[in-house]
Image (spheres, coloured by chain):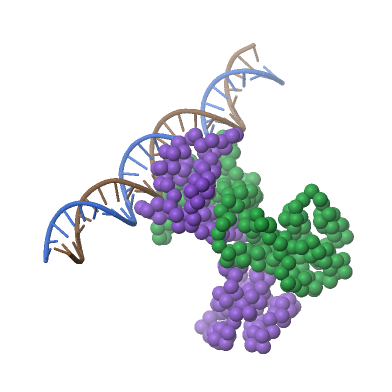
Chain colours: A green, B purple, C blue, D brown
Amino acid sequence: MAVSMSPKQKVYQGVLQEIRRYIDSNNLVPGDKLPSERDLSEKLQAGRSSVREALRAMELLGLLETRHGEGTFLSAYTPYQTVELLSSFILQGGTIKKDLAATKRIIEKELAKLAGRFLDTKDLDVLRSNLENTHQTAGEKHKAFFRHLSEQAGNVLLSKIWYLVDDFSSTVNAVYYEEGFYIKLLDLYKSNDIDSIEGLFNSKIMDRDDVN
Amino acid sequence: MAVSMSPKQKVYQGVLQEIRRYIDSNNLVPGDKLPSERDLSEKLQAGRSSVREALRAMELLGLLETRHGEGTFLSAYTPYQTVELLSSFILQGGTIKKDLAATKRIIEKELAKLAGRFLDTKDLDVLRSNLENTHQTAGEKHKAFFRHLSEQAGNVLLSKIWYLVDDFSSTVNAVYYEEGFYIKLLDLYKSNDIDSIEGLFNSKIMDRDDVN
DNA sequence: GTAGTTAAGTGGTCAGACCACTGAGTTGTT
DNA sequence: AACAACTCAGTGGTCTGACCACTTAACTAC
């Protein structure tokens, strides 16, 4: 366990850092292969079990994917397992819930404004037909709606943050806006009135929380 | 490895489920103690290392807390450390650099607006004297300024996100605004004109990037 | 050439051994 | 009796070495 560590950090946490550094310095992208567990164990001078603890944790977070007999691969962030696990621990505190909802709304507002500059008629059609889809719940529609917006916003970082916050938010409850909200937003897009988006999002609370 | 499992589920995932079920059926609340690793290992007929992989993963998610020599305890779910880890991964990648400044500005804007509702005269004095500190670079002043604001904003999650974005941003170049910007913001606070903050941040580009 | 076999590499899992830390009981001193 | 020091069982932290299961590619036999 020679992974450098200042205080009483656990070995697996040190391994976590090292793996992160490795990914960074080698410019690995999703799909790329990581060294084998035995390799890592030797290079980092840590037991294989410690290396595995780090890898398993990262796997659960959706950061990487392991294929038996093949190896461990960096994966695009797919939070499925995380969501599923976290969702069963919902009972907790109000502060977090409040922060999540507020932060999510802020980010969605800004994504909406950013995207507004790039949306064309086709995009608006997609968004509208998405709202009319009867096979989705309101929560799913919301997600699809803003996913599309985030793709058009031209700010990858903000989009990723949205994914993250939205994901965590989902573990608490499905948050979406009242139906008229999306319509109004589309109207603003159509009339190219980007400046009014701020006001729309700041208008009185219109969130809906699934009872869950 | 007798934890019931349909397909080729890994043992640690089965353990995860069982622990979840245990918590549920025993009505454990944050602070309660879980069975020891050896107990779980025996009860679930799984190797201790597998049990540990599950526990470590849950720990990383912030679902539980382990105290050396004492045991493993259920903890209140705080997504913040997870956010931190995931963010560090999200922040890797090429095109993101150019989004950093924009995202940072957005978050700072919202923090400024949120904090505006809570700032008192003393806070304003602190902020002002901070600007007049001659021992700091413009980048340091900026950081201190918004750190204070983030503390007053009352949204821990958004603050955390700011920290991360700001940190990463620092590794690229020091980003701050022109001196008049902060003064104007303080004036808006003094006159309690929160609504104009949006406009201030959206006004023409006035960022300064250190060449670094 | 193609099908089947083999071997190396890799993740999956387990058992057992120590170490380090905590807390409660035990002992010893005053 | 009160308090300090010690002891020890319980628990997490870590490592090692051993197998098993799966994948891939090289090799062999036809």
In x, y percent, where is residue B36? 41, 46
In x, y percent, where is residue B43? 44, 39
Say left or right for B56 vs A94: left
Name the quadrant of the C terminus of chain B: bottom right
In x, y percent, where is residue A97? 61, 63
Q: Residue A84 versus residue A92: which sits nearer the camera?
A: A92
Quarter where residue B122 is shown: bottom right
Say left or right for A194 vs B14: right
Q: Residue A143 versus residue A68: which sits nearer the camera?
A: A143
**Numbered circles on residues, count:** 0
Placement of A203 over or under B43, stated as above or below: below
Quarter where residue A70 is shown: top right
Placement of A182 over or under A23, stated as above or below: below
Placement of A134 over or under A72, stated as above or below: below
Residue A124: tell me if it is visible.
yes
* Residue under the image location 60 percent in, 74 percent down: B153
* Residue under the image location 63 percent in, 79 percent down: B117
Residue A198: tell me if it is visible.
no
Quarter where residue D1 is shown: bottom left
In x, y percent, where is residue C12? 52, 37
* Residue under the image location 59 percent in, 73 percent down: B154
* Residue under the image location 55 percent in, 59 percent down: A92
Say left or right for B202 vs B30: right
Q: Residue B132 versus residue B4: which sits nearer the camera?
A: B4
